Image (cartoon, coloured by chain):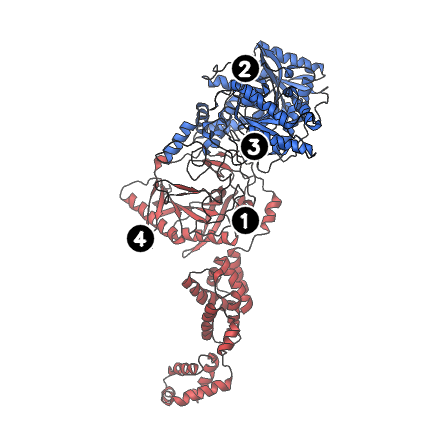
Amino acid sequence: MKNYSEDWEAVIGLEIHVQLSTKSKLFSGASTDFGALPNTQACNIDLAMPGVLPVLNEEVLKMAVKLGKALNAEINSPTSFARKNYFYPDSPKGYQISQMDKPIVENGYLDIETENGGKRIGVTRAHLEEDAGKSLHDDFEGQSGIDLNRAGTPLLEIVSEPEINTPEEAVAYLKSIHSIIRYLEISDGNMAEGSMRCDANVSVRKIGEKKLGTRTETKNVNSFRFVEKAIQYEIERQIHEIESGNEITQETRLYDSQANTTRPMRSKEFANDYRYFPEPDLLPVNLEKEFIEEVLTTMPEMPTEKKERFVSEFSLSQYDADLLAADKDIAEFFEEVTKVSNSPKLSANWIMGELSAELNNENLNIKESKVSSNKLGQLISRIEDGTISGKIAKDIFEKIWTTGKEVDDIIKEEGLEQVTDDQEIESMIDEVIENNPQQLEQYRSGKDRLFGFFVGQVMKASQGKANPKQVNDILKSKLEK
Amino acid sequence: MDLHKLSLSKQLEGLKKGDFTSTELTSHYLNRISELDGQLNSFITVTEDQALSQAKAADDRYKTNNNFSLDGLPIAHKDIFCTKGVLTTCGSKMLSNFEAPYSSTVYEKLDKNGMVMLGKTNMDEFAMGSSNETSYFGPVKNPWNIEYVPGGSSGGSASCVSAELAPIATATDTGGSIRQPASLCGLTGIKPTYGRVSRYGMIAFASSLDQGGVIAKSAEDAALILEAMSGHDPKDSTSLKLDQPDLTNNLNNPIKGMKIGLPKEFFEKEMAPYVLKSIEEAIEVYKSLGAEIVDISLGNINLSLPIYYIIAPAECSANLSRYDGVRYGYRCEDPKDIEDLFMRTREEGFGAEVKRRILIGTYALSAGYYDAFYLKAQKCRQLVANDFSEAFKSVDVILSPTTPGTSFKSGEKTNDPVEMYLQDIFTIPANLAGLPGLSIPCGEHNGLPLGMQLVGNSLEESKLLQFAHSFQSNTDWHMKMPNI
């Protein structure tokens, strides 16, 4: 992967904005639903009418406390808000209410895994702040439109220590955060819709150098893959610049996914002095010990805990457990299937095999699966109890996917029960042997690999319904005679 | 009958007994406004139609004995309080076309008690000023002598009550904007404890200092209305979680044996002899009522003005950022681009004093200056508050002049901002410490009234009003009205 010279290292820090899935906004009662008509979800407070005041939505405190716990971090109490001042048309107050000195979450860490093994990444802080509105530049003939529906939507900004060194680590960290916020159900984490956004601070230095290089900030990269590519590009660009004798400018850059490049967004001359100061309209918030404890009782099982349980309870491999536990919905689906099928290993294989292939085909997520966890469980239990063969099961899976029918109905209607009766199988085998005297002779004179041919013929004769193990056993004894 | 000569409680009594109707009372004031306000300019908007329909509704309720507690009493509102569907300008060109889409909590509380809004009173632009000369809608005159200023920023509220164009008016106080104009117009003005009155819908100047209150003709009138304005508001996170206080019950209790503190730092200042004389006479009155006089020290009080002129502009610089021409209010003509829209809207929409304070505040918060200015000012503010806490361990109220002197002529201080800022030297400390303060008339000089200030401990509005009422029960300074 690395195509730059080996004596450079990159230093990367990520700022991840997570849109919290509260019903109403951070400081007003307006709805946070995505996709409504412009300015239909902006109340007087969101519009920054003269005289309005913010009132904190306490739901976000619970969400932040849970995140803090998941990130092994401290919860600050009191936690306080600050004004970040800047003029922008979609920032209605001319300042954003954010947190400066006492962010609600501080000093945490996250363990990540990459191909090169495990690594601990420090999480500096996570603070609450309100989102801005959107400027729309397309439809207004030379003017811009402002949509303030998003203004005031609660965000948690999670800031990592600059302890990430490769694009792969950055993505692993980002995926891990994504998995955590989905587990905690504090955000849908949808990067395409902007409910999770990532800014990457990147600098490079010669290996062994202690001093950090000048960093750039690449903004709003909206998929895992683009984060990896944007960082990769930025590392290579910076090394190239320095090796060509140029200096890196500290600036904000924008990733262009089509060209796979980054380009400067704002030049340094317009660098803002945000003039932070404590928000006088909101008193510091005390998080009582009882409040925190109460919130922590609602913590769900987290990805690593779940993974470990999958290994110990279901004897799954580390690899399978990791894959299943990374996504909360998949993990839940897996447990539901297993409950019905009684076969964890087979359930895992089916979810990661057939099911995930179908989902990918039709671009669906697991919650939209056309085969429910219950049906998949039944299907697998029919393999387990010998009613059907694995091969037939795949056909049935396809039929459920398209028709939504019950497993047992399909088996019955189409007569797909596995043939397990020894005599019936024997008579099929006898017929096959009788019809293929030449092959029999060749086999008996030492051509062992013809065994497969006979199996195939028997299965064909049974329309795939004969129990393969029985076919094998009986066939072997008959051929040896 | 000279209805405007009646106190609020007498007016309420008259309405209840049916001596006169709210429509008669309201019309009486509306007539006085149209007759007299031409020379005072104390109103920006007179809401005649709305007032008469509110009055009629009150009269109907009296007829069916369904009346509210303050039903049919007229009131004027400072144009800083948002009133739904009515122009709410804050004295600025920036909001000269702004009809509020919602009402402030203060307005709603009084409206629910049946009070009739006569109109919106003139004020210094965004409440920044001490003479009511910074208003976009022109200066307000002092009814005692129209060559003189009424004080500010609640100059319109003071002027109209003083000229008896309204029986009482709401006002706000960030550094003295209720007490100073009350003093200069011979009225009773009270700023309660920070957090007593909701700031929701009260257009922000400096959020940690702003507090709503009233300007009235007596402590008794003030108590009646302030009580109805007070109480916790879930829409204001800095609002105190306390029920509406009882401010009228305690008014007639004697002050015998209670202690009045005189801060030596105030009396060491060079004080005009006539001011000192009035204050000493007032002290004698209190002594005769059995109060004990105690010399106290507020060691850091002289830091108040510089502290205030860091914190208030800093907060205002952010509070006024929302006036950008994008969503409401004034917008410059034909903006070239967004930068031009922001810059020209603000250049053209704000007056000089507002710009001065935005600049001071922006500077004080800038990278590299924050620690030296804003942070230090906040620390010093705590020292001032500590001094008060210490003092209130040994006294009930603290007495001083409200202002360095009586009113001054229009234009006299407009070119010297610092001289103007010194108007608030006695009033600012109470805002810094969030304490209740009131001003009551206690003398006059060359035909102009003069006030004294009483500052109380946190939440002790009731005690302050008790002190004010006992003074007013034994003197008649508050009875004197200008000839207009």
Q: Which numbered dot is residue B407? A: 2
Looking at the picture, which amino acid does disc 2 mark? Ser
Q: Nearer the viewer, mark 1 or mark 2?
A: 2
Q: CA distance from mark 1 to mark 3?
A: 33 Å
Q: Position of residue B281 (x, y in %)?
A: 65, 12
Q: Which numbered dot is residue A66? A: 1
Q: Colour of chain B?
A: blue
- Crowd around label 3: few <14 · some 14–19 · many ≥20 (10 Å): many
- Crowd around label 1: few <14 · some 14–19 · many ≥20 (10 Å): many
Mark 3 and mark 2, same subunit? yes
Q: Nearer the viewer, mark 4 or mark 1?
A: 1
Which residues are the magenta region? B323-332
Q: Position of residue A242 (x, y in %)?
A: 30, 43
Q: CA distance from mark 3 to mark 2?
A: 29 Å
Q: Which residue is mark 3?
A: B199
- Crowd around label 2: few <14 · some 14–19 · many ≥20 (10 Å): many
For mark 3, give the secondary structure: loop
For mark 2, give the secondary structure: loop
Q: CA distance from mark 3 to mark 4?
A: 61 Å
Mark 3 and mark 4, same subunit? no
Looking at the picture, which amino acid does disc 3 mark? Arg
